[in-house]
Image (cartoon, helix red, strand yellow):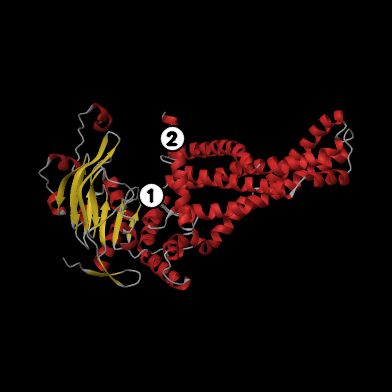
Amino acid sequence: MKQLTHFLEGFGSAVQLLFQSARFAGTLPRQRARFIDQCYLIGYTTLPIVAILCFFMGSVLALQSGYSMENFGAKQFIGSLVGLSFARELGPVIVAILVAGRVGSAITAELASMKVYQEVDALVTMNIPPARILVLPRLAAVLVMMPVLAIIGNLIGWFGGAVICKYVESIAIEPEAYFSALRRYMKFKDVGTGLMKAEIFGFVVVLICCSIGLNTRGGPREIGASVTKAVVVSLISILVLDYFVTKALM
Amino acid sequence: MTHPIHRNPITAVESPAVGVTIDGLTKNFGTFRALKNVSFSVEPGEIFVLMGPSGSGKSVLLKHIVGLEAATAGRVLINGQDATAEHTLERIRIALVFQAGALFNSLSVYDNLALYPREHRFGDESTIRDKVMRALQILSLENSAQKFPSELSGGMRKRVAIARALVMEPQLMLYDEPTSELDPVMSATISEIIATLKDEYHVTTIVVSHDRELALGIADRVGILMGGELVFLGPPANLRQPADPRIADFFHPRIDLKNPRFKNLET
């Protein structure tokens, strides 16, 4: 019962934060510098790990599917399998998980520390709503950067698959054949669905991390606890939402 | 009632000082009662020092004045307006100097001070710069404008926090333990700054402190909270020989050297 109450409190406070931030949407043009800072943090600093992870996920996917599909004589479809898997599912989910781990934890740590050391209280007494300058630029930045990260993640994942297909002897499929299969069986809607999912996951992750950070109470120890909580809640939310969003977009 | 007019320290613009009324304020944290039916008022342009032992509810009361805490019962009125109402902070400029400064660690001293005027569009960047540099000059901090809070000493952090409050052109200044953790020289400097701001600009001031010297030196009136109750309200002169033994103990604590705990002190 206590855990349910905590969950509902957390959910309510995240929704409240969302509405508070939306109220200040008109101030975003004046907050260009903060918005660009957040785009840099969310996009640029996450890019290297997105690239590495997506490359190897694409490679492993091609390797595993090559190994299995060889038995059915269906190796020529590896490109479409890797392409569709990445565009519809793996790309958005991997990027969202990385954003939760890399950016979400940093957001929670920063906001929790500001809360614990009374910087957030100072903002309130200065009549500067934290939702306006701490949350809104982050939400706007993640909306812009998630599709970019997801597209780059997809491209690198596809490329990783192509490299494995060419250089692993047991598969030995030329890149032209791999990409031709990828193009043949993939529609624009598949990529669009993936980008939509990335957008939703990223937005929810940043909202959760901001909300948990701003609701931190206590001392330095609670900052660490908040970061752990934010990452765990974000990861669970991504996977739970994944099912419902996939079902809704089918 | 007519309120005295004061000139703002930064802009020299005239604005009315505000009065504060605490009316039957009670605050419970779970089963713990932090404030018990506290009532008093602070006149416009007055320095009111709120004292009391640790955990007596002083800082909690300050948070109620600035709207950071909601009362369990009772209310706080600032110029007749409820402190918790959203529009109160929009209409009345209240500055709180936090005990630890609460400076924005990711911003330089200059940007800490410029944040409020930028967010509230006090003018173009050159106007804001003038205000910020004026506030830094008042607190003798003009050479620290580009430093970050982590590079400052405790005393400098307190002065930056006061300078940041001044840039807000406040009608009501609240200080939470402004002299705690400071050496006697810096404590005296901060006390002097608080008194100067009041004398020259008549900003209504509420100071929460343990510091007896500060209270007796600068206060127009003093309130003493003990266990969440207001046990004294009056001019500081009345505290030199208080009749209430609780207040006497607080002001003139006696150490019983016969107590075995202090046996090393006797030898």
Residue A215 is at least partly visible in this image: no
Tell me the amino acid under the disc marked 2. His
Labels 2, 1: one chain: no
Q: Which residue is mark 1?
A: B100
Q: Point out the residue furthest to the left here.
A: B243
Q: Disc 1 residue type?
A: Ala
Q: Which residue is mark 2?
A: A6
State the CA–CA distance, disc 2 to disc 1.
30 Å
User: Is the residue marked by circle 1 packed among few (<14), some (14-19), or many (20+) residues within 10 Å?
Assistant: some
Residue drawn at point x = 52 percent, y = 39 percent? A230
Please name the residue shown 46% across and 37% down the image. Answer: A221
In-image side of B38 versus B135 (left or right)? left
Q: Judge by depth and name the residue closer to the eye, B14 or B84.
A: B84
Chain ID for label 2? A
Q: Are marks 2 and 1 in contact (CB under 8 Å)?
A: no
Nearest to the eye among marks 2 and 1: give it.
2
From the viewer's perspective, tell me whether residue B127 is left or right of residue B184: right
Percent coordinates x, y for residue B109 in the rendering: 46, 60
* Residue A63 higher or lower than B107, as above or below: above
Residue B245 in view in this figure = yes
In terms of image quadrants, where is residue B88?
bottom left
Task: Give the image location of residue A74, x and y in percent.
Answer: 86, 34
Label 1: which secondary element: loop
Above or below, comparing residue B251 to residue A33 in the picture: above
Q: Out of A114 and A216, give the one closest to the viewer.
A: A216
Relative to A184, B31 lies left or right? left
* Residue drawn at x 86%, y 28% as measured from the top left: A71
Q: In front here: B176 or B151? A: B176
Q: Quadrant of the N terminus of chain B?
A: bottom left
Quadrant of residue B103 within the rendered picture: bottom left
Callout 2: helix, strand or loop? helix
In the image, which disc is placed on residue B80? Answer: none
